[in-house]
Amino acid sequence: MTHRLLLLSFVAFLSGVILAERYPESWSPVWVLMPVPLCFLFRKRQLSALLTVSLLTGLFYSAAYQAHQRPTLDAWVGQEVELRGRVAQEPTVKASGTSFTLEVTAVRIGTAWRQTEEKAVVRLRETRGGTVRAGDLLSVERALLEKPVPSRNPGAFDAKSFYGRQGIFYSLSLTAAQLTVTGHDEKGLSGRFFLPLRQRLLLVLNQQFSPQHAAVFAGLLFGITENIDQDLIETFRVLGVVHILAVSGANVAMITVPFLLVLKKWQVPARPRYTLTILLVLLYAGITGWEPSVTRAAVMAILLLVARMLTRAADPLTAWALAGWIALLLHPRIWQDLGFQLTMIITLGLLLIPSRLEKRFPRIPRSVLFTLTAELMSVPLVLSVTPVWTPLSLLANLYLMPLLAALVPLGLVTVLLGLVHPAAATLPALLAKWGLQGLFLDPLQRAGASGIGVTHVQAPPVWWLAVYYSMWILYASGRLKHRWRQGALFGLAFLLAAGMLWRSYGPAPLTVTYLDVGQGDAILIQTPQRHVWLVDGGGVPGFLKTDYDVGEKVVVPALASQGIDEIDVLVITHPDEDHIKGLGAVLKHVHVRHIITSFAAQTSEEAPFYHELIADAKRRGIAVTNIQKGDRHTPEPGLEVLYHNPPGQPFQNTRSDSNANSIVFSMIYGQRHFLFAADLEGEVERRLGSLPRTDVLKVAHHGSAHSTTPEFLRMVKPRHAVLSAGARNRYGHPAPAVVERLTAAGSTVWRTDRQGAIRCQTDGEELKCLAWAD
């Protein structure tokens, strides 16, 4: 027990850090009492005191860090300001623009300059590769100060949380004309040594390899992924091997082990050999930017090497704990970072589990057991942010790890020889190209294109993850008596299985999610018997001339995040492109069983994309049905769908015949009534006939002034009204008059342009609505 004190104190410190982050400051008096139970759990007073001090240290250290990290410029968010600052790191340059972190030193509001120590993420709409460098001093004029946006849809990137963990609370979207480089200031060893060295190594990669191969090697060697083709990254993600592009302990081992073997072959004495290897680890960690996984691997490697130098036995668990200590002391919020979570959990699993598996399965090779353990430790956590899994993942990792053990050192040798002279790297570069393309990229791309076994899985809840990892720790620890451990393991396994079965087959509410697709509509409906409906798919009209695909960027990720691989019913309300342009990606990625549309849409002569979409659906064998006013059906017991529009004879000569002939329908579950009004025009609202009182109304035509008339509202009397519109859209939607009418009618107004996706759930009696971004 005594030689694991550092491990126990790390667990207590980490618990304190998490508690300080999760509970409000008003609970601070309670924090002091929280360690009291430890005195009853541990009989040894010294151990209880150590754990108490560690827990309290974590609590107050994290609280102090949070107090220091509070944003100070919130009062000027949404206003134009002038800024001075320094580029903190090398900018990321992509086809869509350039981004970097700016250390803001001064801000001017009005005529007065105010000193500050904030950070802002800057996005330049132009590509300025090479014109803005790390260390540049910038002056920024007429910048609109904003905050990083939170996740606005299921499956969407949460910029607010991502940058907040790094102490970045503001964002700037600029043009090149707003920037002026006023000087240059390299700070510290990183800016003066490691960054220029990394740039030199990347230059050698670009000299020796094609752009695609250089980008992949930059990811494998240094964790730099911005130049890798997005389709290739998606292949890595689907196959569960994207972790190879994040520098980790495996990279450190692939570099240090050959280096040690070479030094030993050259008969370098032990102490100089280990000293040189420690320097190599520090150099590599500095070049890669001390990412969480690198920090953990470097600390553990250095401790093990020092132990070898001193001819002492090193305890890997103590080294693991010390690595965690250092990471948390440098950045208490790093525990929220997925990279830190993965590197710590996978490493702990590799230290504890393979040895026990080897005793139970002695005939299975150790390499297979190690890969299996890494897969078991990583998959549930990865699913919490990337909801895709395939059984090919284990096979892909088993295939890749030995290959990378050769490719990574070979790539590094190519770079080092290229530093001496380009010709010196010719032979290793040829071997590396052949191995990378023929043995690495080609097999992965073929496997990814096959789509074998690829399925989307909804992220597991936090309690399930806690039980899952507790089960494995209990299995590996051996602390409890044999019979008690078996009982505890059985109980935890039962909880895991019960949780999965309940989520898959237990009672579910009717869930309607109005996605934030900008200026358009896309509504996801999940029924109590787990059928899936999608009403429209958003889209950017062709006349706006953009490559942005709402389906690829918003709708498909939202479906994937809910574990949806199949849509039972796709409703195309009308042919306007802001409702259907995103459906091309949906048909490409998701299996659709049935499409509901209308005769009016089918006969429209001004909807080329709609006709292409329907033709694609028929080629895929999807059933297409036209509906009209008066149709009704019961998709499942207790759920009824009524269609109120379009009529059998489509409307003509209206303000917009496409909008006037939109599919308008109600979905009734128990006592709750949802009305989906598509882009219905006000002039035909009165022709719908009598409608019952509505609990949730999808407001017609994004809140256009030409829809949602007072007469219509007096008829449906909505409790909740959802407005789907784009922020600062060119049409002025929603019209202020419509919002006023909805408010006057007693409706709670929800807006996707301000609140992100809106989700409403009901069991047929109780109804709850919430905004995704709140």
Image (cartoon, rainbow, N blue to C red):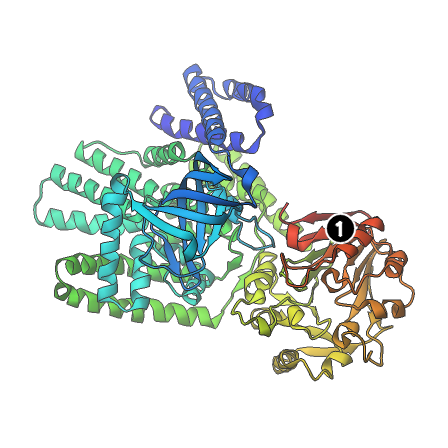
Q: Amino acid at mark 1?
A: Val
Image coordinates for residue 41, horizontal then vertical, percent: 51, 22
Q: Which residue is identified by label 1?
A: 749
Image coordinates for residue 580, horizontal then vertical, percent: 65, 71
The mark tally for this picture is 1
- Position of the C terminus, as image quadrant, is top right
Answer left or right for 698 relative to 560. Answer: right
Front residue of this view, candidates 436 and 406:
436
| Above or below: residue 668 compared with residue 687 | above
Q: Quadrant of residue 713?
A: bottom right
Residue furthest toward the right? 690
- Position of the N terminus, as image quadrant, is top left
Residue furthest toward the top? 45
Image coordinates for residue 270, horizontal then vertical, percent: 12, 39
| Above or below: residue 615 compared with residue 523 | below
Image coordinates for residue 423, horizontal then vertical, percent: 13, 66
